[in-house]
Image (spheres, rainbow, N blue to C red):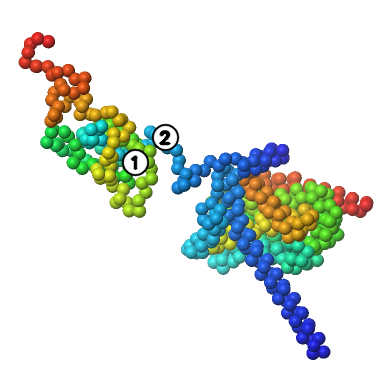
Amino acid sequence: MHRLISTLLVLAWGLWFGSIVMVFGVLFVLLTVAGLLVWFERRLLGFWQDRYGPNRTGPFGLLQTVADAIKLLTKEDWIPPFADKPVFVLAPAVIVVTVLLAFAIIPFTPTIQVADLNIGLLFFLGMSSLGVYSVMLAGWASGNKYSLIGSLRAAAQMLSYEVFMGLSLMGVVILAGSFSLTRIVEAQRGLWFCVPQALGLLVFANAAVAETRRLPFDLPEAESELVAGYHAEYSAMKFGLFFVGEYLGITLISAMIVTLFFGGWLGPWLPPIVWFVLKTFVLVCGFILLRATLPRPRFDQLMAYGWKVLLPVALVNLLVTGALVVLA
Amino acid sequence: MKSIIQALWIVFRHLFRRKATIQYPEQKALLPPRWRGRIILSRDPDGGERCVACHLCSAVCPVNCIALQATEDESGRRYPEFFRINFSRCIFCGLCEDACPTYAIQLTPDFEMSEYNRQNLVYEKEDLLISGPGKYPGYNFWRVSGVQIGGKDKGEAENEAPPTDVYRLTP
């Protein structure tokens, strides 16, 4: 009896320790990746504009992020007197926390996954909805009309695009028969969902760009009209958190697209983690290419595109998928 | 849709283009010979100062960054006692070079004049004078002008006719 208990304790401690290592390992890797992405995006944008981008600090300019972080940390952390202080301070944290929480359900490989929830997909959608609060509250608490306009746009844009984002994923759920991301990846062993769910992929990719407020759908910050939109009043590391949140968001959305449509870790010859990282990397490059190429639409064009094009496409995709699954 | 994909493809191809950037401290930009950069004072082929301290450069200077004072040596040649250019004011317009009647003041293809201390941007004559003739190798003002100086009398300059005796009646 005594022996059994001690064995159980060791086992429990091992599991607990394992999951702690997993959580901190994933956190460490993600934050490093977000930092590197800042550098990587600037380099890549540079190349696409016939420049070099930052290549002076450290080898290939790799330490640029470190330099930026030091600058942001040592800058004056200014809270405007007209701001709503507690909300103003809290808002940037919310976006980072929600995005990091959403990473918990991503299956990087069959073994590396923080939490295999059976409603993983819903958890992801819920977390990305909560992310709206960050942007909305940041603009609202800033007490600045440009920030307010930015956050109003963010609220309208993100809430509308969330609708098609959810709908476009239901086709995948119907095909896989589960909300668990591991099950969804396993269901793609024969054929990646990007083929039968091409329309879903299209709608999801569009909604994803709008959801991460990336160019061309970066109307909430639209520098040319709104100074810097919802984060116009932010400085120092609070501003830095919005940045980290944005780059984590790109990584999250790319990882989600890989998991849902491109077979996650599945692939021949190479180990699973390599496949996952490779696919995510290509999609991140795609996000940056979008930013390098496309101009920003007007706000009414953005909304019209969402409600008049993406919503019908998502609904048709869902109907046809459902009908085919029922018939087959 | 087609145009968007075309645009993405065009932008992507720029990855393999030659970069427009010149990596400055290691690579230098190719400056044209008539580049308007750091101002110098040149000497004539014999090694004498070209500047005759006529004040035209300082008069034409739109930002009044040139200061000089004229004086004369024992042979009767005018030269600047001091010649001072404040490069923290200079706008490198080149009007001084245009105004100079003796090709003394010239602008050169050099822009690397940064200083930590603003005072160091005030160049005195010894900073400005170079040892050569600059852009006009063969030119010597005192040899072609009709001004009388020590060692060169009236009528002895190049292509100069001997002076007319104004007291004679014949032409």
Farthest top residue?
Answer: B170
**Chain on which label 2 sits:** B
**Chain on which label 1 sits:** B
Q: Is residue A178 left or right of residue B64?
A: right
Tag 1 and tag 2 share a subunit: yes
Residue that appears at 74% across and 66% down: A112
Residue that appears at 75% across and 49% down: A203
Instruction: Assign the C terminus of chain B to one quadrant of the image.
Output: top left
Q: Which residue is mark 2?
A: B32
Local crowd size for mark 1, using a 10 Å CA cut-off: few (<14), some (14–19), many (≥20): some
- Identify the secondary structure beneath mark 1: loop
Check the image and report above or below for A72 versus B119: below
Local crowd size for mark 2, using a 10 Å CA cut-off: few (<14), some (14–19), many (≥20): few
Farthest front residue?
Answer: B46
Amino acid on which disc 2 is placed:
Pro
- Identify the secondary structure beneath mark 2: loop
Distance from disc 1 to disc 2, alpha carbons, whole Å, reads: 14 Å
Instruction: Assign the N terminus of chain B to one quadrant of the image.
Output: top right
Amino acid on which disc 1 is placed:
Arg
Q: Position of residue B76 (x, y in %)?
A: 13, 33
Q: Is residue B97 left or right of residue B82?
A: right
Q: Quadrant of residue A25?
A: bottom right
Q: Position of residue A125 (x, y in %)?
A: 73, 60
Q: Earlier in the sequence, mark 1 or mark 2?
A: 2
Q: Which residue is mark 1?
A: B38
Residue that appears at 79% across and 90% down: A2
Q: Position of residue B152 (x, y in %)?
A: 14, 27
User: Residue B39 versus residue A306: which sits nearer the camera?
Assistant: B39
Residue that appears at 36% across and 46% down: B113
